[in-house]
Image (tube, rainbow, N blue to C red):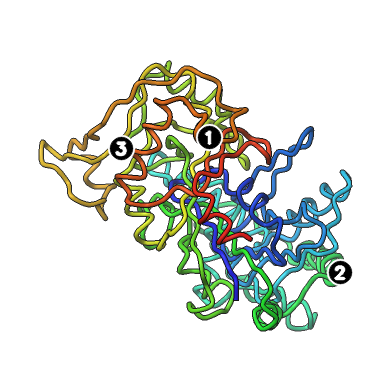
């Protein structure tokens, strides 16, 4: 049962889309297991630039079945828009399917996301305001609407009527805004269902049958480990579990079905929105270089990303939680313009060294937390055309080797550009063992 999980190890935007697209070439399925359209996976192929929000990153390969799993929350309007855009540029989306158990993001989720952020003010989380959090809240609160509720219009009518009455009480009495129209929402979402109905499947049986037939499956995560609702930098996190462990609950399979856990990390760190960031670069000139060269702007919101040095303490923690046995480093080429490159190897609080990544990083940030760094001399050489590890500059290889030694983990692949073919396979025996 060959299956691989691809997960981000930092605060997102590590380049998971490119890696999933690359590694899915010989796969039969790519399955998304959590998150919503608040994520953005970018793929560059020659003159085409794709940003996928809900559709799995294997869609560029026409024979791969792409499934949006039960653990994902789905805005049908966004999904239809994404499908239409792909079709308009010649990409066949006939193999994109939607799990009937997935929960639906409704108009009131968007509004409540916005209102909550406005209410919190300078204490806001910095969400994308796509309604993801409120959708997951309703799922856990057992008042969510699922894709399968559209199968019976009486069921959908009854559920929407009940939930919208409750939501309108919150909207009008707490936030003093105008109520939403039941009729408009009902009619709008019925039309979405008509468009999407040919794609709706019972994904649980589809995926289990695929395992029985020994199909090759990639499970694709959204966001990243440090945004995990349980193990991330709470409360500045997303509202789903982003770790490899959530594959099982997100698609409905047992743990022993999973083989390899591929972690993706940038050669530096970025973060969108609010929250602690111990290795954030305070030198605006260096941060500007990383942001400009790496085009560090959110795929979903276009917000400028905060930039920082690679944080190995948090990366080691992420690898531990996710059981990573194959590491991918992306955007190594972005560092080529820097004379000095730093790597965070630990934290101190009021002069006391921390041994592990802290669970209460939000609180310790207020107690004089400082990062400890190791400095490397830059390589000042364009590496974007290099495809063999031995041909990398010596200083570049020193940087990579230090990462491996600190993490005690083999680096599988290094990305040196945005294009699909701009990669260096560092550990060829492991790579071909996993993806042959």
Which residue is pictured at 42% across the width and 46% down the height?
A: 120
Which mark, residue 79?
none
Residue at the disc numbered 1: 331
**Closer to the camera: disc 1 or disc 3?**
1
Foreground residue among 234 and 83: 83
Does any portion of residue 171 appear in the rendered image? no
User: Does the CB distance between marks 1 and 3 fall below 8 Å?
Assistant: no
* 253 versus 65 height, above or below: below
Residue 11 is situated, as x and y percent measured from the top left of the image, at: 45, 46
* 111 versus 195 height, above or below: above
Mark 2–mark 3 Cα distance, whole angstroms, equals 48 Å
Q: Is residue 226 left or right of residue 186?
A: left
Which mark, residue 194?
2
Q: Alpha-carbon neighbours of circle 1 within 10 Å: few (<14), some, or many (≥20)? A: many
Q: Is residue 296 left or right of residue 353?
A: right
Mark 1–mark 3 Cα distance, whole angstroms, equals 20 Å
* 139 versus 8 height, above or below: below
Residue at the disc numbered 3: 278
Does any portion of residue 140 appear in the rendered image? yes
Foreground residue among 275 and 347: 347
């Amino acid at each position: 049962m060959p299956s691989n999980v691809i997960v981000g190890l930092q605060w997102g935007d590590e380049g998971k889309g490119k890696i999933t697209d690359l590694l899915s070439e010989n796969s039969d399925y790519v399955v998304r297991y959590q998150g919503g359209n608040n994520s953005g996976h970018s793929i560059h192929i020659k003159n085409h630039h794709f940003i996928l929000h809900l559709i799995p990153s294997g869609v560029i390969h026409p024979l791969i079945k792409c499934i949006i799993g039960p653990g994902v929350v789905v805005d049908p309007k966004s999904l239809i828009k994404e499908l239409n855009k792909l079709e308009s540029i010649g990409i066949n989306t006939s193999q994109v399917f939607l799990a009937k158990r997935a929960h639906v993001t409704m108009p009131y989720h968007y509004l409540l996301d916005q209102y909550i952020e406005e209410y919190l003010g300078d204490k806001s989380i910095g969400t994308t305001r796509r309604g993801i959090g409120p959708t997951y809240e309703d799922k856990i609160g057992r008042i969510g609407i699922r894709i399968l509720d559209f199968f019976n219009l009486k069921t959908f009518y009854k559920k929407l009527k009940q939930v919208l009455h409750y939501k309108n009480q919150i909207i009008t009495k707490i936030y003093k805004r105008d109520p939403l129209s039941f009729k408009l929402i009902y009619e709008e979402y019925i039309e979405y269902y008509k468009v999407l109905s040919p794609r709706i499947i019972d994904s649980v049986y589809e995926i289990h049958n695929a395992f029985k037939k020994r199909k090759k499956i990639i499970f694709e995560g959204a966001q990243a480990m440090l945004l995990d609702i349980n193990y991330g930098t709470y409360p500045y996190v997303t509202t789903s579990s982003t770790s490899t462990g959530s594959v099982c609950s997100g698609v409905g399979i047992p743990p022993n079905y999973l083989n390899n856990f591929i972690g993706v990390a940038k050669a530096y760190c970025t973060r969108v929105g609010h929250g602690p960031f111990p290795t954030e670069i305070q030198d605006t000139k260096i941060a500007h270089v990383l942001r400009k060269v790496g085009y560090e702007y959110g795929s979903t919101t276009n917000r400028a990303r905060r930039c920082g040095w690679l944080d190995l303490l948090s990366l080691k923690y992420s690898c531990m939680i996710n059981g990573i046995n194959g590491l991918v480093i992306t955007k190594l080429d972005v560092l080529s313009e820097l004379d000095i490159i730093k790597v965070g190897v630990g934290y101190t609080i009021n002069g006391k060294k921390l041994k592990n990544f802290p669970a209460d990083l939000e609180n310790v940030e207020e107690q004089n937390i400082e990062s400890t760094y190791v400095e490397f001399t830059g390589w000042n050489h364009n590496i974007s055309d290099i495809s063999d590890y031995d041909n990398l500059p010596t200083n570049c290889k020193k940087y990579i080797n230090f990462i491996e030694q600190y993490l005690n983990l083999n680096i599988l692949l290094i990305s040196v550009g945005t294009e699909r073919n701009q990669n260096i396979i560092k550990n060829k025996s492991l790579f071909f063992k996993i993806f042959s």
